[in-house]
Image: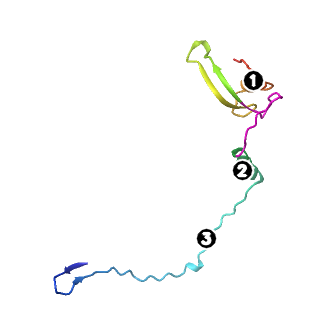
């Protein structure tokens, strides 16, 4: 709006400019087709997804009265001393260890397999 004219006892006057969009005719789009990719899901992928969901919703129950074995999860406390007195001693509580797990050190697997809750183990 420009040239606004406001005075007592006179009519309101102004100039207004409007942008007028051109009319566009859209044609030829009816023949366009999108390529639909073929999606194939293997039984292995389904199995992996199901295992992932199961692990997300898994709970841990205390095991009493039987020794630990492969695929058992043990909650342990660790006290570590560095070799040759280099570095600082380590103490960690409530560490979750999967006996036989792919990310578990072989020494832990070896020494914890067959142990029971409350038992103390020493290893190098």
Q: Is residue 27 above or below residue 117?
A: below
Badge 3: few (under 14), some or many (20 or more) residues near its Cα, within 10 Å? few
Q: Is residue 56 magenta?
A: no
Kindly report the distance in space between the C-alpha atoms of the residues bearing marks 2 and 3: 29 Å
Quadrant the N terminus occupies: bottom left
Of mark 1 and mark 2, the one earlier in the sequence is 2
What is the number of the mark on residue 118?
Answer: 1
Kindly report the distance in space between the C-alpha atoms of the residues bearing marks 3 and 1: 64 Å
Circle 3: element type: loop
Residues in magenta, as a range: 57-74
Q: Quadrant of residue 110?
A: top right
Most frequent secondary structure within the magenta stretch: loop
Residue of label 2:
49
State if disc 2 and disc 1 touch (CB < 8 Å). no
Q: Residue furthest right?
A: 66
* Near-viewer residue (51 or 94): 94
Badge 2: few (under 14), some or many (20 or more) residues near its Cα, within 10 Å? few
What is the number of the mark on residue 34?
Answer: 3
């Amino acid at each position: 709006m420009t040239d606004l004219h406001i005075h007592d006892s006179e009519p309101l006057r102004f100039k207004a400019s409007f942008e007028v969009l051109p009319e566009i005719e859209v044609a030829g789009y009816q023949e366009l087709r999108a390529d639909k990719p073929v999606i194939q899901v293997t039984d292995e992928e389904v199995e992996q997804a199901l295992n992932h969901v199961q692990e997300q919703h898994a709970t841990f129950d205390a095991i009493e009265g039987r020794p630990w074995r492969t695929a058992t999860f043990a909650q342990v406390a660790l006290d570590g001393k560095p070799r040759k007195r280099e570095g600082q001693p380590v103490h960690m509580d409530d560490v979750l260890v999967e006996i036989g797990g792919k990310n578990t050190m072989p020494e832990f697997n070896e020494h914890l397999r067959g142990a029971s809750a409350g038992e103390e183990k020493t290893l190098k």
